[in-house]
């Protein structure tokens, strides 16, 4: 009787015993979870993602937690949504439904900023290889430069699942740091004359509803033919946009950008947090991933601004190079940063619409860059 | 494939492929804007006297 009493009681103390005997890594991870809570709640840094990621991290690092073991809740969410790639793709449907490409159509050439804004991906990929990461790991780390959480998760979950936690947290963290990271680079790479360039805004829209409706179909066909491995990514974002532009399925559009996106975001965040177990996360690779991710964002911004300078020169001073910084996928934050920086030098300079165009171009560009990379990997026989 | 060849291929073909694809899209958007211009608003009918 007493023996069974003691045995039963010991079952209640296993967790505490573990924590004090060798649980320092767990304590560090719990502190990281607390940091994510602080960023999400006190600083409002990507709270929709960082809060559930933090809680998933918190749950999985409570000593002897079985949530990521077979049949555990977080393992279940991971298996149904991330291993199958379903969660990031469903989020893309919502993103497509939320995105208005009109500013891009008004001046199509600024779509090129969406390509320049992906330079960081390829730069970081090369650096990751130099640091000794495997080729598929380097691709997954490079994709942080897309500034596009779902794309980063989609690629990493398939080709370097051991890096999913660090890559996802780095991607979302750096997206939220765009207002801090970008302005010094924009300032350093442009002259005062260039920063003061005013861009004209058409008085009336030059884009017909039919153009807006056909755009998602054409993008899907063209990109699907060139980079079929990326078709799930581009296809879902364009599905959401097609529903929005058709105007005949407001319930589906609304559900995609609200209910579905919200539910999936919750599950996605929890499942990613579940991958942040101490023994997986607390490695030198994680630090390297964060360092390389920072380089990726800097490279994206610099390439975008430099292309902006070139286009400014070629257009005879009609394009403000600052909008090049918005050619990343952090939408609409990068466009707002561009507007704020532009108005810092000229309060009557309204760059927002053009920056929005570059920013939506960045959304297409980031998915396209990922699609091209995956198709290259397929072509080289690596996947 | 060695890392050097892999990295260079990804950088050159990856960046180039992204630029070319987006270039094609720019051309198609401009084409659509020509083929499907914004419909002119109907002129307001005069009130019969």
Image: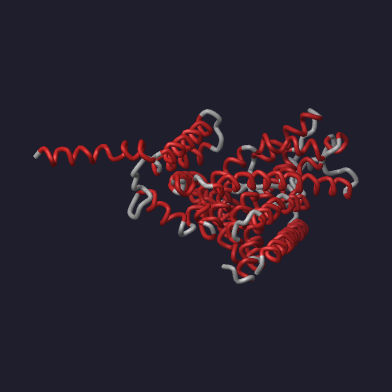
From this viewpoint, is residue A337 visible? yes
Please state, as top left, top right, bottom left or bottom right, where the C terminus of chain A lies in the image. Answer: bottom right
Please state, as top left, top right, bottom left or bottom right, where the N terminus of chain A lies in the image. Answer: top left
Residue A135 in which image quadrant: bottom right
Residue that extends furthest to the right in the rendered view of this protein: A316
- The answer to whether residue A193 is above or below residue A205 is above
Question: Residue A245: x, y in percent?
Answer: 60, 52
Count of numbered tags: 0
Question: Residue A115: x, y in percent?
Answer: 72, 54
Residue that extends furthest to the front in the rendered view of this protein: A21
From this viewpoint, is residue A248 visible? no
Residue that extends furthest to the left in the rendered view of this protein: A1
Question: Residue A317: x, y in percent?
Answer: 88, 43
The residue positioned 65% from the left and 43% from the top of the image is A294
Question: Residue A332: x, y in percent?
Answer: 64, 41
Front-most of residues A318 and A141: A141
Query: How is the structure coloured here?
Result: secondary structure
- The answer to whether residue A282 is above or below residue A137 is above
Give the side of residue A1 with respect to residue A150, left or right: left
Give the side of residue A267 with respect to residue B21, left or right: left
The residue positioned 65% from the left and 63% from the top of the image is A223
């Amino acid at each position: 009787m007493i023996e069974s009493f003691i045995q039963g009681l010991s079952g209640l103390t296993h967790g505490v015993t573990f924590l004090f005997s060798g649980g320092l890594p767990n304590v560090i991870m719990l502190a990281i979870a607390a940091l994510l809570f602080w960023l999400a709640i006190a600083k409002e840094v990507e709270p929709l993602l960082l809060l559930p990621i933090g809680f998933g991290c918190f749950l999985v690092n409570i000593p002897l937690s079985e949530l990521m073991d077979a049949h555990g809740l977080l393992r279940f969410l991971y298996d149904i949504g991330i291993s199958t790639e379903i969660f990031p793709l469903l989020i893309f449907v919502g993103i497509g439904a939320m995105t208005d490409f009109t500013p891009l159509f008004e001046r199509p050439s600024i779509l090129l900023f969406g390509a320049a804004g992906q330079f960081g991906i390829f730069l970081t990929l090369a650096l990751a290889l130099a640091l000794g990461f495997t080729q598929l790991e380097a691709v997954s780390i490079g994709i942080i430069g897309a500034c596009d959480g779902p794309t980063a998760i989609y690629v990493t979950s398939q080709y370097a699942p051991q890096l999913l936690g660090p890559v996802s947290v780095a991607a979302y963290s750096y997206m939220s740091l765009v207002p801090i990271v970008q302005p010094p680079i924009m300032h350093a790479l442009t002259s005062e004359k260039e920063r003061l360039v005013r861009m004209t805004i058409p008085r009336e829209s030059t884009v017909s509803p039919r153009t807006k409706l056909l755009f998602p179909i054409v993008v899907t066909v063209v990109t699907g033919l060139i980079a079929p491995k990326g078709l799930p990514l581009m296809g879902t974002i364009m599905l959401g946009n097609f529903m929005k532009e058709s105007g005949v399925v407001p319930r589906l559009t609304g559900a995609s950008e609200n209910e579905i996106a919200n539910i999936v975001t919750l599950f996605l965040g929890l499942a990613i947090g579940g991958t942040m177990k101490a023994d997986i996360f607390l490695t030198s690779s994680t630090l390297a991933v964060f360092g390389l991710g920072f380089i990726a964002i800097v490279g994206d911004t610099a390439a975008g601004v430099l292309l902006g300078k070139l286009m400014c020169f070629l257009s005879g001073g009609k394009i403000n190079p600052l909008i090049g910084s918005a050619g990343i996928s952090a939408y609409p934050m990068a466009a707002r940063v561009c507007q704020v920086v532009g108005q810092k030098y000229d309060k009557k300079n309204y760059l927002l619409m053009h920056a929005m165009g570059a920013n939506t171009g960045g959304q297409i560009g980031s998915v396209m860059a990922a699609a091209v990379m995956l198709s290259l990997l397929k072509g080289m026989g690596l996947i | 494939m060695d890392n050097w060849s892999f990295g260079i291929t990804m950088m050159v073909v990856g960046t180039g492929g992204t630029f070319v694809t987006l270039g094609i899209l720019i051309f198609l958007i401009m084409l659509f804007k020509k083929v499907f211009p914004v419909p002119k608003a109907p002129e307001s009918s005069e009130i019969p006297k």
